[in-house]
Image: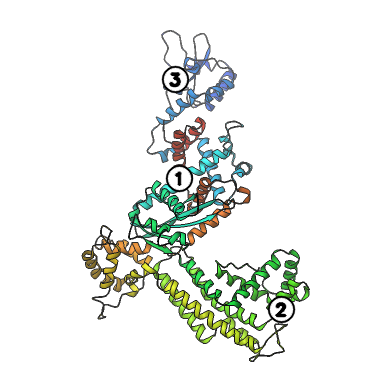
Amino acid sequence: MDKWLICPESSQNARPPNNNKKWKPAYEATRNTNASRELMGKWLSKYQWLRVEYAGDGEQLCFCKWCSDTKRVNTFTKGVCVTKADVLNKHEKIEDHKYAQIAFVSEEPTKSWKSAVVSANTKAAIAVKAVMNIVYFQCKENIATRKIKSLKQLCCDLGGDNLRDLEVDKHTNYESYDAVHDMEDAMANLIKNNILNKIKESSWYSVCIDESTDVSVTQSVIIYLKSVCKGQLTTDFLQLQSLTGSTADDIYTAVYNVLTKFNIDFKKVSSVGSDGASVMVGCRNGVATKFKQHNAYMIPIHCVAHRLALASGQAADTIPYLLKFQEIMNKTFKYFEYSGKRTRTLHAMQSVLDQADKKFVQIFHTRWLSFFGALEALNCNWVALVSLLIQDKSAVGQGLLKSMTSYKFLACSAFLTDVLYILNQLCLTFQKQDLNLNTVLSQVEACVAELKSISETQTGTKYMAFLDEVPKTATPEGFDYQGHHVRDNESMRKECKSIFALFMTHIIKNIGERLGNMDQIAQFIFLLPSSIPDVTSADFATYGDDDLVKVCEHFKDHDSLGNHSKLSAEWKLIKRILVVRCKSMKLKELVKFLDDQSLNDLYPLMVSLYEFILSLPMATVDCERGFSVMNLTKTSLRNRMTIPHLSNVMMISINGGDRRTFDFLMVSLYEFIWCLCMNLSFHFRWQLLIVSGVLVL
């Protein structure tokens, strides 16, 4: 504290006499009356910038210490007689005083801007951080921007009175759309900068893209980056970008502009992953083909989850009854979807029969594996469903009843449940984050083996349980099954066996073609430790030599991986380590091991090659999850959200961590600098300066 500033704790701070006036120590003047001393004590406690002096004639003059020290010229630098606190309040609001306040704060010593924030005992700092917490919470919980006022009021009612300190007047309370969007933009930029810094340090990264439309039928492309940095694999949402069209040129231009804006090095892009649509992977004019112009060794990848869905759906499309079966399931869904009375009756019957309450779901051809959820609901609700259909005399109800009370329908339902359970487990594996090559290969191999077993023996769990409950031979008069009459004949049973055999043949063939040999990815399989023979094997010495030639040919345009002699020398040395110490490791564990052991110094090319393989996006399920976040955020009630605003909210929602550990102080610094550049309100700049503790003029 300046030695001339009067404060409540000290009164030994009078100013030396001026040559023109006779000055008295202020503490002597304040002893004139108790009322004067009490009033002055309150003012000096409230206004830290205030200095009071008394002339020889007893006149009371107030000065602004900050304005005087910073060479400002106003009434409070010359001295003014103040009788009301309103005069002091008005002085605090003038621009001259605020600039002086910034300069005064900037002169206080601090080790760093962050320690200054921690030590700053200001209400503004707490208020700004509190309101940023609210905005962050809104983004994470998909709460509309217009709810900021009610959330602030709720926090104040619960004891968060510090939020009131952010209100300058009734018009400046930082509850407007612009203020909230500015904070969202600052937080999103901080998260994005952290991601980009990590990307710059990565050895390889891949790009995952997908195109969709939101609730307002606005086309956009979502972009994810999958990177390997210091042995760690991470997948991050980068941006949601609007599209001017849905052609390959439109998508390529949008993605290319985003990557260029963020200075993404195309030489480090290992792959472009997509859903496999022709506009994405077309060999002549697809988006991936256009990106190969910048990087010849980049691999376009068709998502394995989409491949599995296509393999399953196309196998069913070749069998007419399975198409009819799907139609029956969708009719059942619609039968209850549009009738509350039927749904209520079904729930009542389920309660009486003590059956699980599972809702019927719709089946989509593009998501054929959703069939499994529909079959689960059917198996749980069949007795209650048939009981309800018997009471319903409508044409729709009687048609469904006839379809569902036949041996062929029940047998297909049981058999498909067994088959789709295996495919559903494989699909769930493909939906895991950070899926890699050896996981895909091992799971596909296990899935095909199990499907072949069911095909040869027809001994699925659900199907065998069904056969145990029905007559062993066909009964033309039908039979009772779980309390209901079921139609049956020899023709139905023969047709069922034919359907099962044909479907299993097609599904195994499709999976083998679509997932067994994944184009350019297959050339790297020999590098997996599980594929390398034991050291004692006669093939160990020469294993992988021929395959390595193909790899070098693939990387012929790369600066180092195209060098066959160096890569071959490292391969001969490192494969012994891989067999002895890494035989059972997954690819992610292997790359982490190589980084922990600092083997990248000894075998830089091989480590880089393994990181390249790890960065390949085997699935684009992250893009699908991103679109789910988009649809949860931009709803029919928020259909006017712009794509940039939506992208910022998604950045916080997807990549933002726990609110309690988020660095709002760094956000305040970025926001303050941005406000200065954009010439926003002085008060907002000042509030953010208090939080950041950094002077930027």
Residue highlighted by disc 3:
72
Are the residues tagged 1 and 3 within 8 Å (C-beta)? no
> Which image quarter: residue 588?
bottom left
Pick the residue in front: 673 or 382.
Answer: 382
Q: Position of residue 215 (x, y in %)?
A: 59, 52
432 up-or-down from 23: above or below:
below
Instruction: State the residue at coordinates (27%, 75%).
Output: 543
Instruction: State the residue at coordinates (26%, 72%).
Output: 546
Q: Nearer the viewer, mark 1 or mark 3?
A: 1
Say which element carries label 1.
helix
Residue highlighted by disc 1:
189
- The type of residue carrying mark 2 is Lys
Q: Is residue 254 left or right of residue 265?
A: right
Q: Position of residue 598 (x, y in %)?
A: 28, 61
Q: How is the image coloured?
A: rainbow
Q: Nearer the viewer, mark 2 or mark 3?
A: 2
Mark 1 to mark 3 CA distance (whole Å): 37 Å
Instruction: State the residue at coordinates (51%, 40%).
Output: 182
- The type of residue carrying mark 3 is Arg
Neighbor class of circle 1 (other Cα within 10 Å; few <14, some 14-19, many 20+) is some
Mark 2 to mark 3 CA distance (whole Å): 93 Å
Q: Position of residue 57 (x, y in %)?
A: 52, 8
Residue highlighted by disc 2:
402
Are the residues tagged 2 and 1 within 8 Å (C-beta)? no
Instruction: State the residue at coordinates (52%, 23%).
Output: 94
For marks 2 and 1, the one nearer the N-term is 1
Say which element carries label 2.
helix
Pick the residue in front: 89 or 54.
Answer: 89
Image quadrant occupied by the N terminus: top left
Q: Is residue 632 left or right of residue 386?
A: left
688 up-or-down from 464: above or below:
above
Disc marking residue 93 = none
